[in-house]
Image: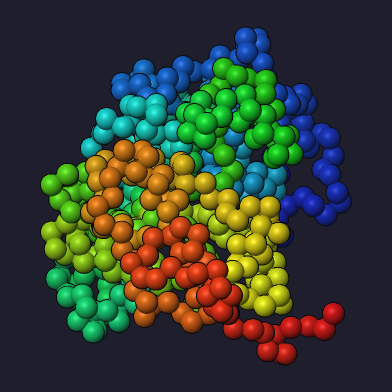
Amino acid sequence: MAPAATSPNATPAPVQKGTPAPSTLSKRFGSRVILTTYPKQSGVEPYPLNWAAEDPDERGPVIVSRYGKTMKYRNAIGAHGGSYMIYNALAVAGGNLDMDFRPSFHNTEPVFDFPRQPAWFDKTKIVAMDPFGHEVQTLYKKHLDDGLDIRPSIAITRATMRVAEISEAIKNDVLPVDGNIVLNRDGDVRVTKVAVEPVWYLPGVAERFGLDEGTLRRALFEHTGGSWPELITRPDLKVFLPPIGGLTVYIFGPPEKISDPNVRLACRVHDECNGSDVFQSDICTCRPYLAFGIQEAIREAQNGGSGICIYFRKEGRALGEVVKYLVYNSRKRGGDTADKYFQRTENIAGVRDMRFQELMPDILQWLGVKKIDRMLSMSNMKHDAIVKQGIPIYERVPIPDDMIPEDSRVEIDAKIHSGYFTTGKQLSEAELQQTRGRGWEKWEDVAH
Ligand SMILES: [Zn+2]
């Protein structure tokens, strides 16, 4: 084991002279590299994992670690941490993290016990997260005490948040201070937060997309550079922890009300847009709609109902920021009109949207949502995915016109034309050509 870095400024260990000497490698990882495993191979003894079983013991823990004695009990493919699994690997490679490290879960338990829902035990309702992911510390304590490396994939905490638009709404008496949810006129708001890492039950995911499991496994294997051979060699392993971002639920008001069918629920399902959400770019409606969603969720909670905002890490319609900025360039240089809005993305990404909302409703099922009274979203894809999963939506609430930045009209008009919900006007093809975004001034572009 290489010595741990002694100061936060220390350069991470090896890297100076290329690959570490084989002796260093074998000491830390063993000389034998297991590229993949096969069912019934000697020493391979997957711990039974019966997805959707009601009894946590019968269901069994999700075991994915390749370390030490845990390796032979693995019953899932991939690794914990979503895309952060790579940083974890780097920390081990650099000697900053002992590969045998076991977390102490003392005091990490959820701050709220979400009541178990029938959907937790239904293979068609929850396929993209582990319904027991927040209770690993207690449900599988015996296994942890036995030295197996098992990790939670859900964490539940409480906090106070302050969002500029909400402070403004309080100042303008759009929202009152109630001392319980909205704490003061500065805009401090109490919130319960649920962070979820994706855990996929592959047969269920395949079914949701109308695929056979073999096709799904092969595509995941081939198009991730062959990263997980067990997708192909271990059809007996049905669970995969994909290296993608997860989601966070922001809950306003008492969490127990979410699953109460007699209580009103306001819900915003939001997909990440860092440029707008955090840095307030004016090219889209993401942050204004998010702020409106939070405001209306708080309002519903203050009226005795419940409000949730679910934030999915699906940057740039799950195409990522690099593709997104390439699209911005092609829009701004090509005459940014609403009629060509989707075409610009299709030219570069091959699709107009890669978010595939099919798996999104799982979190609603997990929370026990029975119906949504006010859906703060205009997306037909989100609406259809939720309704298809048996959760009715009673009212759809578009973003108010006065919250739409001028330069984002191109996006919103194109989306409305393509099927997004509106209570306003749907523009004709000819009118879309007239919806034009702000062009670039000379200083914003380089000469080619
Ligand atoms: Zn955006």
Nearer to us in this view, 134 or 241: 241
- Residue 329 visible? The answer is no
Measuring 57% from the left and 25% from the top, which residue is drawn there? 212
Q: Quadrant of residue 289?
A: bottom left
Measuring 64% from the left and 46% from the top, which residue is drawn there? 86
- Residue 252 visible? The answer is yes
Q: Taking 25 as reference, is 407 left or right?
A: left
Nearer to us in this view, 278 or 408: 408
Query: Residue 394 appears at what percent x and percent y?
Result: 24, 52
Q: Taking 309 as reference, is 344 left or right?
A: right
Query: Residue 281 appears at what percent x and percent y?
Result: 53, 76
Query: In the rendered view, how is the structure colored?
Result: rainbow
Q: Is residue 211 above or below residue 97?
A: above
Measuring 65% from the left and 35% from the top, which residue is drawn there? 220
Q: Is residue 275 above or below residue 213?
A: below
Q: Quadrant of residue 343?
A: bottom right
Nearer to us in this view, 430 or 420: 430
Q: Taking 143 as reference, is 294 left or right?
A: left
Q: Is residue 310 above or below residue 282?
A: above
Nearer to us in this view, 164 or 80: 164
Question: Residue furthest toward the bottom?
Answer: 442
Q: Taking 393 as reference, is 261 left or right?
A: left
Query: Residue 167 appears at what percent x and percent y?
Result: 29, 78
Quarter of the image containing the C terminus? bottom right
